[in-house]
Image (cartoon, rainbow, N blue to C red):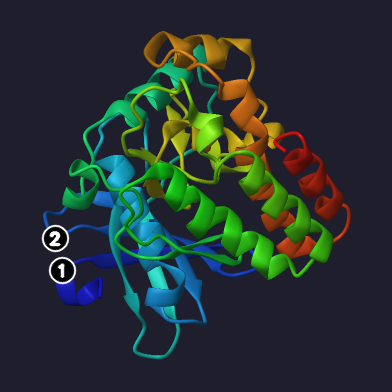
Amino acid sequence: WLEANGYTVEKSSGSGGSGWASFSRLSVVKPDGTPQDLFVKTASRSAKEMFEGEALGLRAMYDTHTVRVPEVVHYGDSPSGGSYMMMEYLDLRGSANPEEFGRLMGRMHLAEPTHEEARAGKFGFPVDNTIGGTPQLNPWAGEWVDFFRESRMDYQVQRAGSSELSRVWDQVKRDTDGLRALFEGAGPITPSIVHGDLWSGNYAATADGVPTIYDPACYYGHHEAEWGMSWCASFGPGFWKGYREVIPEAEGFQARRPLYQAYHIINHYNLFGGGYLHQGIGLLNQLA
């Protein structure tokens, strides 16, 4: 694709990988003659399975022009098999001001959505994607509570296959009128683009200190859902000070927080097994 579109590849080097993809760094010359470094992910599965959701999510966050997000150059299927995604390479060796990071995340959550369905008040995303290695379903829904209950929690609980977890989750739904009672006093809930998997491994800062986020599991949701992974994100008081300057804490957020954490904890059980099941049950018991 690069050569067909006027790029010249000068150098290529490996940069490790994850359980689902391999990474490399390419030094190229763009069609206009300027040099650029690209970060490339490759995988054995198709681009639709592996990279479409991530690429569209990165672009939706990038389009807010708030927190720094690597710009996607292209993604697609490789003629030799498998797939790839290319984005700008960022030198992530810096240290960000936590208050500024928090403010930028708040501005991202308040930005006008890129996609017309979200601008019309719907929650979801144009395509399904993944949360870790788990499919994440993103059908458009008119109500946030319905979307989170059905496309987030119901799906994860069903995948877990635990009768005890299912029992507790059913009890939560009965006790909270299908989660609606948890959102009394939350105010109007409008769609925000959320990163969806924001933990300490998915944010950093450029060499000149610009806060940067990547490896998303994006969708349009209530901005509070962003903090379901905060148990392993190392956000300090400075971050929250900056964020709350932009988006004050809504009534009942602390009571809803176990719900958002439970989604990710149960997903961790579905990915890794072990004690995450009992953690998830414990979080749901706080809601019942």
Q: Residue at x 88, y 52 (%)?
A: 275
- Discs 1, 2 touching: Cβ within 8 Å: yes
> What residue sits right under mark 1 in the picture?
6
Q: Nearer the viewer, residue 87 or 272?
A: 272
Q: Secondary structure at mark 2?
A: loop
Q: Earlier in the sequence, mark 1 or mark 2?
A: 1
User: Residue 71, how many percent across, how many down?
Assistant: 30, 48
Q: Residue at x 64, y 17 (%)?
A: 236
Circle 1: residue type: Gly
Question: Would residue 170 be found to the left or right of residue 188 on screen?
Answer: right
Height in image: 27 above or below 133? above
Height in image: 71 above or below 84? above
Distance in Å between CA atoms under marks 1 and 2: 5 Å
Q: Residue at x 80, y 48 (%)?
A: 281
Circle 2: residue type: Pro
User: Residue 233, how many percent across, how many down?
Assistant: 65, 33
> What residue sits right under mark 2 in the picture?
31
